[in-house]
Amino acid sequence: MASSGFSWKLEDHPKLPKGKIVAVVVLDGWGEANPDRYNCIHVAETPTMDSLKKGTPEKWRLVRAHGTAVGLPTEDDMGNSEVGHNALGAGRIYAQGAKLVDFALASGKIYEGEGFKYIKECFDTGTLHLIGLLSDGGVHSRLDQLQACASENGAKRIRVHILTDGRDVLDGSSVGFVETLEKCLSDLWGKGVDAQIASGGGRILISWYELYNVGCFLQNDWDVVKRGWDAHVLGVAPYKFRSALEAVKKLREELKTNDQYLPPFVIVDESGKPVGPIVDGDAVVTFNFRADRMVMIAKALEYEDFDKFDRVHFPKIHFAGMLQYDGELKLPSHYLVSPPEIERTSGEYLVHNGVRTFACSETVKFGHVTFFWNGNRSGYFNPEMEEYVEIPSDSGITFNVQPKMKALEIAEKARDVILDRKFHQVRVNLPNSDMVGHTGDIEATVVACKAADEAVKGRPTLFRPTHLGFAVDYAVMVIEGGHRVVTIVKEEMILDSIEQVGGIYVVTADHGNAEDMVKRDKAGQPLLDKNGNIQILTSHTLQPVPIAIGGPGLVPGVRFRSDVPDGGLANVAATVMNLHGFEAPSDYEPSLIEVVNK
Ligand SMILES: O=C(O)[C@H](O)COP(=O)(O)O
Ligand SMILES: [Mn+2]
Ligand SMILES: [Mn+2]
């Protein structure tokens, strides 16, 4: 590094001071869209975010959070947490997994790589198994890429193990995807390839997150992965069908469940035998390009020593990921396409320049605000300068049941850390609008948006005198009618504490979700299904997201520039570096702010 003249040292910003406490708040799945009844952010009471918007255009603006602005193939690609947090933290736009796989397939390079050669060694005598999310959502995987991988690769026997989506795509779309895939596999029969779907189940029931290990408490649901293992690898599941189409149709109808939550099933032959368990000598490819829902199953498929659950049988296979999912762990060790090499992220620079950083979210978004933020890198850059805290998420429920999730706990943690003044950057992700938006429950999503908004700033709450013991520091006594005494306890949250320490805040989001909960036609009108019901949109959106800056530590004259109208999430890193008193590296996307004389 030194010989190339590279240095981690950042230039001082000519006008902005160092040492301010900067709160960076990411509202997950919080976009800006026209106000109507399906815009849960609009319907919810969100006084904090509404008041920030009043700072338009100097202190509040919109930034692009989808498509090419975050390294996705086209402008029809919605944003997602991985690419959104990558852009926020890395300050540059990297071609992301979806795009890299497209390139590799189009150029044929995928078949020349080490990963493909490795799995090909099994093709003469073994089966090629493809495991992943059956979807055209483009967030974790894409159906057209799966089809391309299944076709003309030289394998003589192929078994596909599907996870049905219903989250990045409409619920019920699994049926059409299975039809398309079955057609593609039956075309292969014509070419002498024995190809069929062998097992499946809903993505939430058999694939789960790994949350990246920084030595904190990790809450991974290995039972969920075991259900996937049993179905895909052992061929054991509570439901058996002769075809995948029958499976998804019947399970949806009979259990009244949706694609996300279909129980595990296996496909059996006429004698009731599973058609595609994974056995010694087989090749396995997990075809998701995105890591988080594949890392745990990848560990189970790869590690000789494994104690998370009883695998019953650990077949000797050649296993490759579509991408390498964790560069630190080198997991999997074989992969078809190299992942984006995201380096010199803002987090790493800031730590090298003396900025102490704290990051926090609850389990379901903890990896987003750490691993994804840091360019898909697990662990600390410097444990002496950083602390990452994971608040355990509720488990075993869908988040519409508890839409407030852990927003308050995350905000309280951030508040305490800000008031402690030990860290310069306090970064949080508030998951509510995204996680509850994904359930498609509009009423619960409204509650979720309100909860996230309250966590950003704080809320006044009425308590009777008997409750005076609680948070009394922030209490205000109010005399009503000369008799009744009511105590208004101000629950202080992130922006209040920034106010107290003279700090700065940056409030933004990683992509849209809760601001639009209905599928629309080209004119923007809600689409109805054949029964006249609106089609609920559980996915992210193509909408831009807000970014607001403020706080007493902001030098007068700081405002959003007007010459970066197309600014996107990747412009946020340079902005935050400026607010810490540094110029961003020259190859970063430009900062969104300027300082004018006041
Ligand atoms: O995995 C999921 O939950 C969704 O497909 C994407 O959501 P995220 O990008 O917000 O994590
Ligand atoms: Mn997200
Ligand atoms: Mn999401």
Image: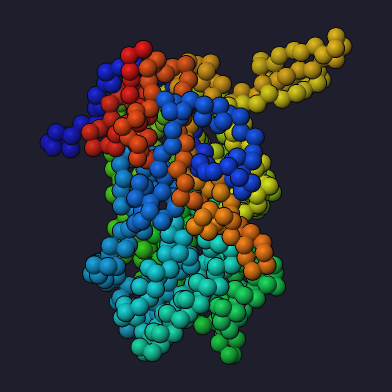
- Tell me where residue 305 appears, x and y as whole percent: 44, 60
**Camera-side residue: 545 or 315?**
545
In the picture as drawn, the residue positioned furthest to the front comes out as 523
**Camera-side residue: 353 or 167?**
167
- Tell me where residue 406 appears, x and y as whole percent: 61, 39
Residue at horizontal 39 percent and vertical 69 percent from the top: 144
Q: Is residue 349 visible?
A: no
Residue at horizontal 70 percent and vertical 73 percent from the top: 254
**Camera-side residue: 48 or 222?**
48
Location of the N terminus by quadrant is top left
Quick check: 244 above or below 74?
A: below
Does residue 585 appear left or right of residue 223 in this picture?
Answer: left
Residue at horizontal 26 percent and vertical 21 percent from the top: 12
Location of the C terminus by quadrant is top left
Does residue 397 appear left or right of residue 278 in this picture?
Answer: right
- Tell me where residue 165 appears, x and y as whole percent: 53, 63
Quick check: 526 above or below 416?
A: below
Residue at horizontal 75 percent and vertical 23 percent from the top: 462
In the picture as drawn, the residue positioned furthest to the left comes out as 3
Quick check: 23 above or below 198?
A: above
- Tell me where residue 88 appears, x and y as whole percent: 39, 39
Does residue 200 appear left or right of residue 77 in this picture?
Answer: right
Quadrant in the rendering for residue 480: top right
Q: Is residue 268 visible?
A: yes
